[in-house]
Image: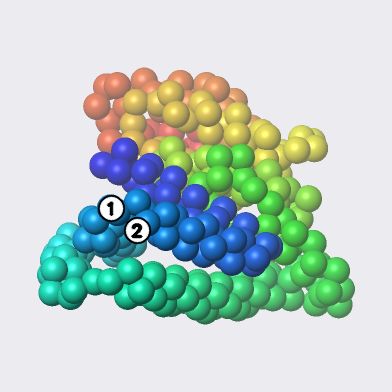
Amino acid sequence: MKKSKSLIEALNSLASVTQTLFLKMPVLFLVIIYLIDLGIRGYLSAGFSVTTLLGILILFISIGLYINTKSFAETTLSFILGVLTIYAIDWESANITLFVILYLSYVILAFFISSIRLAAKQESILVQAACKLDIDDYDSVYKRIKEISQKSTKHNQLSIIEKSEIIRYLAFRQVIIGEYDEAINIIELIKGVTQIDLIQCCEIYYSFYTYIYNRRPSPPNISREIEKMFDKVTTLTIAYNEFFDIFSNTKRILVEDKIKYDKYLTEIRLYALKGYSSADITEILKSEYLN
C-alpha cells in the first residue's frame, strides 16, 4: 500500500514539475508536437503498422487515465472502446497524422485550461494568506509568499497547491514567515513518513512549533528543531497517530519543563512496550507530572 502511494506521489511530483516547466516555456509544446509529427512520419515511411502505433497510444492513454482516476473499471472500458475503434476504422497515413494533431491540440487546450484553474486556485489561497499576514503591506507579502510557494521542496513530493495550502495554514496560525521555507520541507517529510492528510501534518508541525516557540530561550531556527524532534518520534514502537494524540494531551509537561523531551519519549516507549494504550499513557503521564 505504501509503495503504491509512493509511486502515485512520485508521478504527481513529475506531473507538477512538467506543468511548471511548460508554464515557464510554452514553446516546448510546439517543439514536442513537431518532434512527434516527425516521429510519426518516419514510422509510417518505414512501413510499420498503423494499428500497432495507435494501440500503443491507446495503451499509454489508458495508463494515464488509470493513474488519474484510480478506477480499473472505467479505464478498462475506455481501453476496450479505444481498441475497438482502431479495428473499426480503415486508417490511412493522412488520417492518423490528423488524428494525432487533433488529439495533441486537445491535450494542449485541456492543459492550459487546467493551468488557468490551478493558477486561480493558488491565487485565492495565497490572497487569503497575505491578507492574514499583513493587509497593510499586502503586495510585498503576497509577492514573498508566492515566491516561497514556487520553490522546489527537498523531495519534490508536494504540488504547488499543497505548498500554498501549507502557507495559508501557517499564516492563519501566525507562524513567523521566516520559517515558511523550512516548515514546508518539514511538513513534506511528515507527510511522506506518516502517509496522512496534509492538514493533519500541518497540525503536527504546529504542535511541535508551539512547544519550541514557548521555550525560553527558543532556538533561532524552529523548523530545524522540529525536524530533530520528529526524527526521534520515528524510533517509537507505537503508531504515529497514537503518539501525536499523547503529545497533544500532555504537551504541557514539556512546556512547563517538568521533564526533558528525550526522557518523555523514553517513558512513552516503555509504556507502549508494556501494552498500554495511548489513552492509558496519557493518563499515566498526567497523573505523574501534572498532579
Q: Position of residue 16 (x, y in %)?
A: 53, 56
Residue 82, by quadrant, is bottom left
Q: Residue at 68%, 62% (x, y): give it.
A: 24
Q: Is residue 63 left or right of residue 79?
A: right
Please tell me whether mark 1 sits on a helix, a strand or a loop: loop
Q: Residues within 10 Å of mark 2 (few under 14, many from 20)?
A: some
Q: Residue at 67%, 70% (x, y): give it.
A: 126
Q: Is residue 60 left or right of residue 213?
A: left
Q: What residue type is disc 1 on?
A: Phe
Looking at the image, which is closer to me, 141 or 68? 68
Q: What residue type is disc 2 on?
A: Leu
* Above or below for 232 versus 82: above
Q: CA distance from mark 2 to mark 1?
A: 6 Å
Q: Residue tagged by mark 1?
A: 48
Q: Position of residue 223 (x, y in %)?
A: 67, 40
Q: Residue tagged by mark 2?
A: 44
- Whether pointer 2 and pointer 1 mark residues with C-beta atoms closer than 8 Å, the reply is yes
Q: Residues within 10 Å of mark 1 (few under 14, many from 20)?
A: few
Q: Residue at 16%, 65% (x, y): give it.
A: 83
